[in-house]
Amino acid sequence: MPKKSKLKGKIAHKDIFQLLTETTKKEKQKRREELLAPLDVKEFFVEGKITINKRTCKGIECKLCIKACPTSALFWKTGEVGLTEELCIYCGACVLSCIVDDCIRIERKRSNGEIESFGKPKDFMVLQHWINVRKRFQRIKDVFPKPEDYLRRYKKWEESRE
Ligand code: SF4
Ligand code: SF4
């Protein structure tokens, strides 16, 4: 009997923990929506993570990432780059402008589950290139008929000639 109640306690503890995590997530999301609403920026990623390596950052010498950030998620605070993570939309503009490879690293997740991660301008540009190629390919696919549609049309045309 005591074993059962111990197990019950464990499950309840797990549920409470899960509940707390979910509530924190929801609260974070709400705060994020409130902060981003006046900025009128579009979010393309469902989740993300950004890190700044303070040891390799050239800080005061450049601050280029701060200038490039469209949401002011990055700011200057007492001798180093600060970050308001709720304002970050994981766009990559800061990585693209950073003079130190892997100083800023971004990992982001798209709604289809795809995960992208990069820390160098070159990696970001390669990634962007393939995103554009994929978009172009999709546009072409949308405009031109599929082989089976083409065959159907051809068959109809053949029939009309008989
Ligand atoms: S990823 Fe975009 S929004 Fe986030 S800190 Fe960098 S520039 Fe700002
Ligand atoms: S652009 Fe890179 S090196 Fe320059 S301040 Fe930002 S993180 Fe540091």
Image (spheres, rainbow, N blue to C red):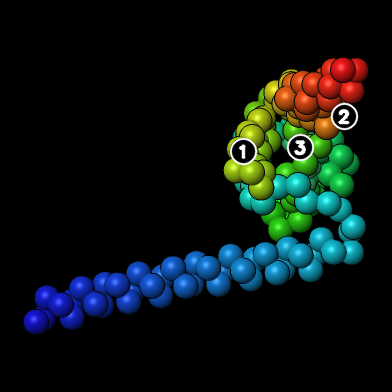
Image quadrant where one finds the C terminus: top right
What numbered label is drawn on residue 143? 2
> Relative to 11, does residue 132 appear above or below in the rendering?
above
Q: Position of residue 4 (x, y in %)?
A: 15, 77
* Among the two numbered marks 2 and 3 on one chain, the one whose residue lies closer to the N terminus: 3
- Which of the two marks, 1 or 3, is nearer to us in this view? 1
**Would you call the spot at circle 1 few (<14 residues within 10 Å), some (14-19), or many (20 or more)?**
few
In the foreground, 31 or 103: 31
**Would you call the spot at circle 2 few (<14 residues within 10 Å), some (14-19), or many (20 or more)?**
few
- Which of the two marks, 2 or 3, is nearer to us in this view? 2
What numbered label is drawn on residue 114? 1
* Among the two numbered marks 1 and 3 on one chain, the one whose residue lies closer to the N terminus: 3
> In the image, what residue occupies the spot 63% across and 33% down?
117
Q: Position of residue 87 (x, y in %)?
A: 76, 56
> In the image, what residue occupies the spot 80% across and 64% down?
35
> Relative to 99, does residue 66 appear above or below in the rendering?
below
On whether ligand 1 comes within 8 Å of the CB at mark 3, the answer is: yes
Element under disc 3: loop
Element under disc 2: helix
> In the image, what residue occupies the spot 61% across and 38% down?
114
What numbered label is drawn on residue 92? 3
Task: Tell me the CA gap for discs 2 and 1.
Answer: 25 Å
* Among the two numbered marks 2 and 1 on one chain, the one whose residue lies closer to the N terminus: 1
